[in-house]
Image: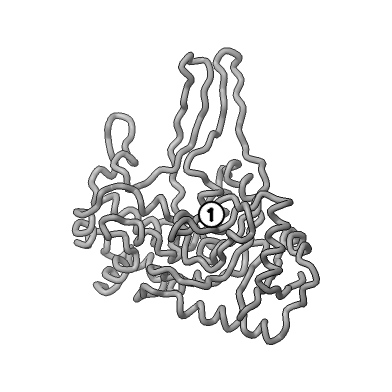
């Protein structure tokens, strides 16, 4: 693969070509926040952003989607599988790692054709972090840099951008960059230094244990720790923390039938383990009726349950949950540090 160095003007020119030829969903400003949305012009792309409001995983698993359309009269059932190709431009390393996790989760056992179809149709341009967010702790989680899963990695080195294709799709996109010099030894060394620095510096919050220690900490008497009741007493059960989380993927499925009862759709909606009725089942039994139980479940799911099943911690250190929580009780670092200190 050919690694190129380009300046700001060539970067914008390249993005303009991509917009003309592809559907490009890029990171851009909305007031003082940043969102992933269809990119209309190259000047709107903001690779210097701190963190997006919603993670890019929401483009692969939407908040709401139709799975099946059906008609009672004819008995016709038609699966709705997304097939639109798009370029996702500006994914930070921690979000790319979250996407990699979702890839393995949705491919496990009975694979999810809806997620996997979107994933196959997505060409991902990742970008190294330039501006850390106020609650980031990616350096503590080993997610401040990424080396796999994407098609192109863009890194800002000085006043130049290094465009590094890693797949055939990425190479095809990068071919639209005109007359760009190859990566120099000096720029390569500076990029390596950028990655080394990211491993240390992107931690506005400090985790006082290693991520791989969390399953043991949670599995060794922490289930009855008083912090669960203390924090849950302030919880609104609003689900904000899970809605903005790049590794939360729970969903509910419902059938919506037209007024004439002849046609309808089966839809899937993102759900949250923090909502009061999440664990409600037939007969009115609720497995996690108490807020304390729901609050604790989120931390165990991220720090132990997914580890037990797949071998990785389901938290990538983006800090979105801390920012989004109206009660200021969703700080994962604070909770895990308290548990670690009591061991």
Q: Residue at x 63, y 55 (%)?
A: 41
When asked about the image quadrant of residue 335, the answer is bottom left
- Picture coordinates of residue 303 (x, y %)? 39, 62
Q: Residue at x 68, y 67 (%)?
A: 11
The residue that mark 1 highlights is 36
- Picture coordinates of residue 45 (x, y %)? 59, 61
Residue 342, compared with residue 318, is above or below; it is below
Residue 188, compared with residue 264, is above or below; it is below
Taking the image as shown, residue 2 lies to the left or right of residue 305, namely right
- Dividing the image into 4 quarters, which one contains the N terminus? bottom right
Q: Residue at x 57, y 45 (%)?
A: 115
- Picture coordinates of residue 5 (x, y %)? 71, 75
Instruction: Report the front residue among 302 and 162.
Output: 162
- Dividing the image into 4 quarters, which one contains the C terminus? bottom left
When asked about the image quadrant of residue 32, the answer is bottom left
Taking the image as shown, residue 280 lies to the left or right of residue 230, namely right
């Amino acid at each position: 693969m050919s690694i190129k160095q380009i300046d700001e003007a060539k970067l914008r020119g390249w993005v303009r070509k991509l917009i003309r030829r592809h559907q490009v969903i890029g990171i851009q400003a909305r007031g003082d926040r940043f969102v992933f949305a269809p990119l209309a012009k190259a000047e709107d792309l903001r690779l210097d952003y701190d963190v997006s409001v919603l993670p890019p995983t929401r483009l692969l698993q939407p908040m709401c989607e139709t799975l099946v359309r059906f008609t009672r009269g004819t008995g016709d059932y038609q699966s709705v599988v997304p097939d639109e190709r798009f370029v996702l431009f500006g994914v930070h390393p921690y979000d790319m790692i979250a996407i990699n996790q979702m890839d393995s989760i949705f491919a496990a056992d009975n694979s999810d054709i809806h997620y996997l179809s979107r994933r196959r149709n997505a060409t991902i341009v990742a970008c190294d972090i330039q501006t850390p967010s106020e609650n980031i702790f990616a350096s503590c989680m080993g997610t401040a840099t990424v080396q796999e899963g994407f098609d192109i990695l863009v890194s800002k080195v000085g006043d130049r951008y290094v465009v590094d294709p890693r797949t055939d799709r990425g190479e095809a996109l990068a071919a639209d960059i005109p007359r760009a010099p190859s990566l120099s030894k000096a720029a390569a060394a500076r990029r390596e230094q950028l990655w080394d620095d990211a491993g240390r510096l992107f931690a506005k919050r400090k985790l006082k244990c290693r991520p791989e220690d969390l399953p043991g900490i949670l599995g060794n008497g922490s289930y009855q720790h008083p912090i669960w009741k203390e924090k849950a007493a302030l919880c609104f059960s609003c689900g904000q923390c899970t809605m903005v989380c790049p590794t939360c993927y729970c969903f509910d499925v419902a059938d919506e039938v037209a007024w004439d009862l002849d046609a309808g759709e089966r839809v899937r909606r993102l759900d949250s383990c923090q909502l009061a009725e999440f664990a409600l089942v037939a007969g009115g039994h609720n497995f996690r009726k108490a807020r304390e139980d729901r609050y604790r479940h989120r931390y165990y799911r991220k720090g132990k349950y997914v580890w037990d099943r797949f071998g990785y911690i389901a938290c990538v250190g983006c800090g979105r949950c801390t920012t989004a929580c109206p009660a200021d009780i969703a700080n994962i670092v604070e909770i895990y540090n308290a548990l670690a200190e009591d061991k």
